[in-house]
Image (tube, grey):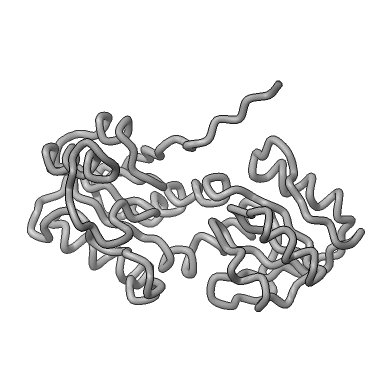
Amino acid sequence: MKLLEIYEYLNELSPFELQEKWDNSGLLIGDFETEIQEIALSIDVDEKLIDSLSHNTLLITHHPIIFGGLKQLEFSKYPANLIQKMIQKNISNIAMHTNFDQTHLNDYVATEVLGYKISKKDGFVAYIDIDEDFNDFAAHVSQAFGLEVARCVKCGDRVKRVALTTGSGCSLMKSLEADCFLTGDVKYHDAMEAKSINLSLIDIGHYESEHFFAQILEKNLKNLGLKVIIASSENPFTYIHP
């Protein structure tokens, strides 16, 4: 099957035109005329992953390896070092980032990972209506995402409306209609801002909330008749207990 046929299938599944203006989803490395026999799925690209892949593989990732404008390709530096290896092995790459967040990832995390019904969708935000003790809810969230600890900003004893954005969503805080926000990459000043507007926060991690990408997409690619493998990259963070 030609890469173009796979790209068109992915575009029907999660239209690339839905991506944010700052995003870089789509075909990043490769040729639409390339014949593809094997597809690998991963949240990111890393060296160990590339070394494990066969030549002529199509790698579909959540995060784009080429994000900002590349002014040079110095092969001793990231991401040029990975791009060089991919080209040498004729590994093509399609990224499905903010378009997939909107069409699939947030929905899956809310319903399949957390086990709640979505009451409202607004772009990158999925709303969940509940009525639970905050500490109990935080414990459930931690267990669902496999977190070492629940890192929270607690502004109330109960949670009634939850907003969910996988990955990094703190820039959306001021526009939310909720009393608790689940997202990743929460910084100190994000926490201070949340506290000032009386918005509880639970940091669900960037990798932890998005690594479901591969298993979601695998289900949708089974009908293509190609070998599809989940080859997720590793979480770049290591957690060391004292």
Residue at the right extreme of this rendering:
157
Who is closer to the viewer here, 33 or 236? 236
Who is closer to the viewer here, 177 or 81? 81
**Image spot of residue 151 (x, y percent):** 73, 46
**Image spot of residue 81 (x, y percent):** 22, 39
Residue drawn at the location 31% of the way across and 55% of the way down:
223
Q: Is residue 28 left or right of residue 87?
A: right
Residue 81's place in the image compared with 221, above or below, is above
**Image spot of residue 76 (x, y percent):** 22, 36
Residue drawn at the location 24% of the way across and 50% of the way down:
225
* Viewport quadrant of the N terminus: bottom left
Q: Is residue 154 left or right of residue 226?
A: right
**Image spot of residue 176 (x, y percent):** 68, 75
* Viewport quadrant of the C terminus: top right
Residue 122's place in the image compared with 213, above or below, is below
Q: Is residue 222 left or right of residue 92?
A: right
Residue drawn at the location 37% of the way across and 75% of the way down:
21
Location of residue 230 by image quarter:
top left
Location of residue 224 by image quarter:
bottom left
Q: Is residue 176 left or right of residue 69?
A: right
Residue at the top extreme of this rendering:
242
Residue drawn at the location 92% of the way across and 59% of the way down:
157
Residue 49's place in the image compared with 110, above or below, is above
Location of residue 85 by image quarter:
top left
